[in-house]
Amino acid sequence: MAYLLQHLLADSAARQPDRPAVAAGGRSLTYSELDRLSNQVARALLAQGVAPGDRVGVLAVKSAASVVGIFGALKAGACYVPLDANAPAWRLSAIMRDSGIAVVLADLGRASSAAAMADSLPQLRSVIVVGPHWGQEGGGTADAPPPGLAVVNWDAVLAEPDGTVAGDPAIETDLAYILYTSGSTGTPKGVMISHRNSLTFVKWAAASAGLGAGDRVCSPAPLHFDLSVFDVFATCQAAACMVVLPEGAAIFPVRLAERMEKEQISVWYSVPSVLTMLVTYGNLGKFDLSRLRTVIFAGEVFPVKHLRELMAALPHARHLNWYGPTETNVCTAFEVPGGDSSAGPPDPVPIGKACANTDVFAVASDGRRVSRPGEVGELYVRGPSLMQGYWGQPGKTQEVLVPNPFQAAYHETVYRTGDLVSQDEEGNYVYLGRQDGMVKTRGYRVELGEVEAALYGHPAVHEAVVLPIPDELLGSRLRAVISADGAGGLTREEVLDHCRRRLPGYMVPDVVEFCEALPRTSTGKVDRARLAGHGR
Amino acid sequence: MNVREPHGILEVTQLEAVINDYISQELVQDATLLPLTNTTSLLETGVLDSLSLLKLVLFVQERFGIVVDDVDLVPEHFANVDAICAYLRSRAEESAGQAGGHG
């Protein structure tokens, strides 16, 4: 009975020990190898004093090594925290401090930077290098580790016994991982996902995409992005092969198309902007993508024009639109009608209906449950996929995990998405927009308040407001309007430099403007509507 | 194919400066990479992602009056500032050659 994520690996390793589990750059790990290597990582973690429930950081790009590390952490009973390898050190430290990470699993390329963080992060006890590191020789960190920090090299991990670690270290309601997402008050929020939360999604997703052992599943989403839960775990449930692209492979569209052909990808999962780039600049007609049978997209709205082009380029494939905030996992889905249907994709593409074992409903502004097509309401979600809350933030958690207003007989928790929706005549939900200051750029959630808080951190900034600029390809770009103290001394470069030290790249404003004073409404609030009207 | 007047800029090392300035000011997110050298990998450092590549392509197309073809959007041409400049020079020569221009 699979009730922990690592049980998926145990089952697949027992059923299909010799099938490839993870393929990268022409090399692959079988299910049996993945199982044994992750047993060794689990033992290395236990030897470093990791106890059930401890948070373990994963500072690594998506790779065979990081998948080994993730399963190793779970087998040790830990909750893993994927750390964005490209985020500024300031933000990484904030996340590691917030979640109380004492042990980090790092790939070879990042072991030194993980060790270097120990200087400013006394809680950090150990860095364990995970492998295999194909194509990279050696196995150590270059510099001597700071005093008090243990660095365990991959060779030492390989010296651990590779048999199954006896006994289950967790139950299904324990945390499997924490995914950090933008927080409106300036600090990232850690979304806590239990094994049960994740498995509810994983089992539905594997069935819904029809995954089988012959599939080659690929997603360019990094590990700190919740899309990666699909290619790491749903693939494992089906004993299929997870294909890892080298970092940056999705940047160059023609190269991406070439690789999709060569790797014989059969199931693809990404944000729409990657697919838009692929269909616009990928020269798809030149490649044989006949093996690609399912294309799944999530994270933002797919402009129908580009979806239509994609469906014309891949007429044999199913196209699925999945929807769900990190806090709920995927909660609704819509299969876009194929090319043979005369209508083509509806505009906008609906987010669809609730997934199996999940229920969604919309609540109008007067508190009534929406019942008629076309009526607008906020989407609520209930079911076993809902997060456990935000790590260490009970107040923030209570704002979104609320009692079901339509269940008087007993207590039931539902999640308020903050997303406005309506239903079409077929009962499919259609996404209309946000109730608050959250925007999406390249599929990443950005709380405008977090960017504003970073701007206010600059001593010369008097007032700052950040507004979204709609962008068809990216969802939104960010425009900062600033009034600065002093006689116009603050420059755009200084503002950008300041932001880049505090925020990940996708949160740094694209446009910076200065004004003497921000316009105010009659109630004294910053007049966002007026500023937006002055935007481009 | 259709290089306009190259403003003489493709002839001198000013080209490297123009490209370096643009990338440093508009695309670099990690301040520790600055000042950017012309051989710093734009891929390993994460400077280029799908958005910043698109911005860069639009910039060179507009600045130098060339069209970057789909098939030229490859890592070899965008690995670092020097590679971008080598690519731009090859495009300029190609188009000068086609126009029957000087050697």
Image (tube, rainbow, N blue to C red):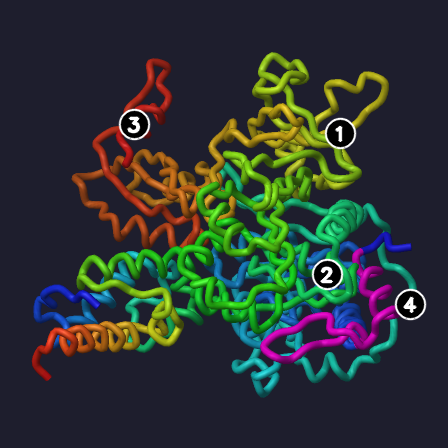
- Residue B2 percent coordinates (x, y): 18, 65
Residue denoted by label 3: A533
**Disc 1: which residue:** A413
Q: Earlier in the sequence, mark 2 or mark 1?
A: 2
Residue A235 badge: 2
Mark with earlier residue (3, 1)? 1
Q: Position of residue A298 (x, y in %)?
A: 58, 46
Residue type (three-letter) at the residue carrying disc 4? Ala
Position of A429 compared to B96: left or right?
Answer: right
For the residues carrying marks 4 and 2, which lies nearer the camera in this image?
A: 2
- Lower position in the chain sequence, tag 4 or tag 3: 4
Q: Which residue is mark 4?
A: A166
Q: Residues within 10 Å of mark 4 (few under 14, many from 20)?
A: few
- Distance between the alpha carbons at the discs numbered 3 and 1: 39 Å
As for residue B99 lying within the magenta part, the answer is no
Contact (Cβ within 8 Å) of mark 4 with mark 1:
no
Q: Circle 2 marks a residue in which chain? A: A
- Is B69 positioned to the left or the right of A81 in the image? left
Quote the CA–CA distance across marks 2 and 3: 46 Å
Q: Circles 4 and 3: CB distance less than 8 Å?
A: no
In the rendered image, residues at marks 3 and 1 fall on the same chain: yes
